[in-house]
Image (tube, rainbow, N blue to C red):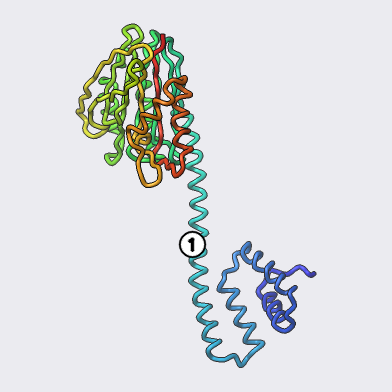
Amino acid sequence: MKAIKLDLDNYRKLLKEYLLTKDERALYQAEQFSKLSVQHNISPEEIIHVHIEALKELYPELPREINDSLNFLLEAMISYGLALQENHFLREKQLALESEIAVAANMQKTLLSTVKPCIKGLDIGAISVPANQMNGDYYHFVTDKDDTLGIALADVIGKGIPAALAMSMIKYSMDSFPENQREPSVILESLNRVVERNVDPSMFITMFYGLYNPEHETFSYASAGHEPGFYYHAAKGTFEEIKAKGLVLGATEHANYQQFVSHIRTGDCIILLTDGVTECRLGDRFVERDEFLQVIKDYIHLPAQDAVEGVYKYFERLQDFHLRDDFTLIIIRKEV
């Protein structure tokens, strides 16, 4: 079989050959021509125009209705061709954007990476699962020479690359604070000024900062509008909400944050989370608070890392489970 040439005259020949002989080989050649036409950006209206010309050559006395219908088809294909070109252009832009987002997501993982510390007397577990490619949640551990542990947990109200940039700014601002300014209320007040001055007014950040002191066995904490955590009383098998109020970061320049202190008993757990945990969906309904706490209770006896992963996997396995927001869960257990 001769290789078809990519020109519109060849299409005329193929059409005439098929109409006169009904040879299916012409159909195959037409299929190949269509593929080459796409590769060489021959528009649909060009092919339709040549098709009409070839028909008129073969059948000069075409009925008026047939001729009008072909002209109608040609006009429709002109609009179709323009829409197709626009679709290809937008698709190329989408692919380029997806590539940029993938690069940004990898950079985010690098920039916001944190090492889960080994602190004597503490068992720490953390998991953060983004609902989309970019994670709007952020957690960070800060350790001092005396094994004091700082825990930051934040959630940007807004997603994508702007959220990632805001989180990077938070991380590097925290890293610049001196060790003698690690009190939760001081941390949040300092970060609030940074966010208020440098982040777009439409973007706010909720944040919880806690400080564990191994010498006094205390947990100091403050919150900037963040999702309440829970304190698990191992002896009673009960949960108590960690209540702390405060404005989200960036709402106003002069914001004060109240600091609270709790004594941590052996076996008890501190459970910190973002609203993506409490806003998990099963079909058309949200996971209820008591249901979520029961799941945590079912896994709380495990090592902390196994516990947080077990909680997430439990919901992930459920039918109709939908993660509508980033899911971040931290469990800290005080051991002997």
Residue 86, x across and y down, in percent: 48, 62
Q: Count of labels shown?
A: 1
Q: Residue furthest right?
A: 1
**Residue at the image position 41 percent from the left and 8 percent from the top:** 336
- Of 220 and 166, the residue lying toward us: 220
**Residue at the image position 48 percent from the left and 66 percent from the top:** 83
Helix or strand or loop: what does disc 1 sit on?
helix
Residue 335, x across and y down, in percent: 41, 12
Above or below, comparing residue 26 to residue 230 in the picture: below
Residue 212, x across and y down, in percent: 34, 14
**Residue at the image position 50 percent from the left and 80 percent from the top:** 72
What quarter of the picture does the N terminus occupy? bottom right
Q: Residue furthest top?
A: 215
Q: Say which residue label 1 marks.
A: 86
Q: Residue furthest bottom?
A: 61
Residue 209 visible in this rendered orientation of the protein: no
Above or below, comparing residue 268 to residue 287 in the picture: above
Above or below, comparing residue 121 to residue 288 in the picture: above
**Residue at the image position 29 percent from the left and 26 percent from the top:** 191
Above or below, comparing residue 233 to residue 91 in the picture: above
